[in-house]
Image (tube, rainbow, N blue to C red):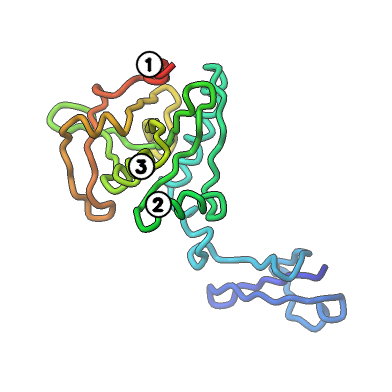
């Protein structure tokens, strides 16, 4: 196990690797140099340049991860047995092979003790339109979830926590089903950086875990 050496030159990350103390002594090491011991493939990455980590620079993405953790804790209090659905390509392979060229989207959890319901957890800002609170849900994601539902024959529920300054409001959880979108005519807005979204009226969704009880 060697040494990773990181210097910042002209606001650029400069990385070098030394296999031993002799090679380490030959490198440019300063008082502000960062050194850590590790395998050669443990290469540091700038978030902005990383395919794997760039998304973590987005506040909305981190808020979504926080929302998933809150959901797990609240589900446990409601005696729900969750099975986490991993999003890596290998875990998703059997679905994509079955779907072939049809775009599909996987939720975050299955609820094992309620009909294997699939749950996708979101964190969205609630805002006012024509006197009522709404939040956005991507039209593209609706069709991807619908395609998945057609394959699995399993209902898919969207669980949405209110986003307040990129912090999920654990006291404001709303739920609706993909089937519900099919049955209702909802307003669609086209946002520059997001694309087409359904504007979901908060008052027409279910509060907390109430919707799940209807599937028991």
| Image quadrant in which the C terminus is located | top left
The residue lying toward the viewer, choosing from 149 and 126, is: 149
Q: Nearer the viewer, mark 1 or mark 2?
A: 2
Q: Which residue is mark 2?
A: 99
**Residue closer to the observer: 120 or 170:** 120
Question: For numbered disc 3, what is the local secondary structure?
Answer: helix
- Residue 80 percent across, percent down from the top left: 54, 21
User: How many dots with numbers?
Assistant: 3
Which of the numbered marks, if any, corresponds to residue 145?
Answer: 3
Q: Could you tell me if residue 160 is visible in this image?
A: no
Badge 2, how many Cα within 10 Å: few under 14, some, many 20+?
A: some
The location of residue 21, given as percent across then percent down, is: 87, 75
Is 28 situated above or below 180? below
Up-down: is 142 above or below 30?
A: above
Residue at image position (40%, 52%) is: 99
Q: x%, y% of residue 38? A: 77, 64
Q: Residue at x 28, y 51 (%)?
A: 194
Helix, strand or loop status at disc 2:
helix
3 or 2: mark nearer the eye: 2
Identify residue for label 1: 214
* Label 3 or label 2, whichever comes before in sequence order: 2
Quadrant in the picture for residue 90: bottom right
Q: Earlier in the sequence, mark 3 or mark 1?
A: 3
Q: CA distance from mark 3 to mark 2?
A: 12 Å
Whether residue 27 is visible to the viewer of this picture, yes or no, is yes
- Element carrying mark 1: loop
């Amino acid at each position: 196990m060697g040494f990773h050496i990181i210097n910042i030159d002209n606001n650029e990350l400069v990385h070098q690797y030394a296999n031993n103390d002799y090679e380490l002594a030959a490198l440019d090491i300063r008082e502000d140099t960062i050194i850590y011991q590790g395998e050669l493939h443990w290469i540091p990455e700038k978030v902005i340049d990383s395919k794997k980590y760039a998304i973590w620079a987005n506040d909305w993405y981190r808020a979504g991860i926080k929302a998933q953790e809150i959901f797990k804790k609240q589900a446990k209090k409601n005696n729900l047995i969750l099975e986490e659905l991993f999003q890596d390509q290998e875990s998703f392979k059997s679905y994509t092979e079955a779907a072939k060229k049809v775009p599909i989207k996987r939720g975050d959890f299955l609820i094992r003790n309620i009909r294997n319901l699939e749950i996708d957890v979101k964190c969205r800002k609630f805002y006012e339109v024509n006197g009522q609170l709404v939040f956005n849900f991507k039209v593209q994601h609706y069709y991807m979830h619908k395609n998945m539902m057609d394959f699995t024959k399993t209902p898919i529920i969207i669980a949405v926590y209110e986003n307040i300054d990129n912090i999920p409001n654990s006291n404001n959880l709303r739920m609706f089903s993909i089937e519900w979108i099919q049955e209702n005519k909802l307003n669609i807005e086209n946002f520059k950086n997001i694309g087409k979204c359904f504007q979901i009226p908060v008052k027409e969704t279910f509060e907390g875990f109430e919707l799940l009880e209807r599937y028991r």
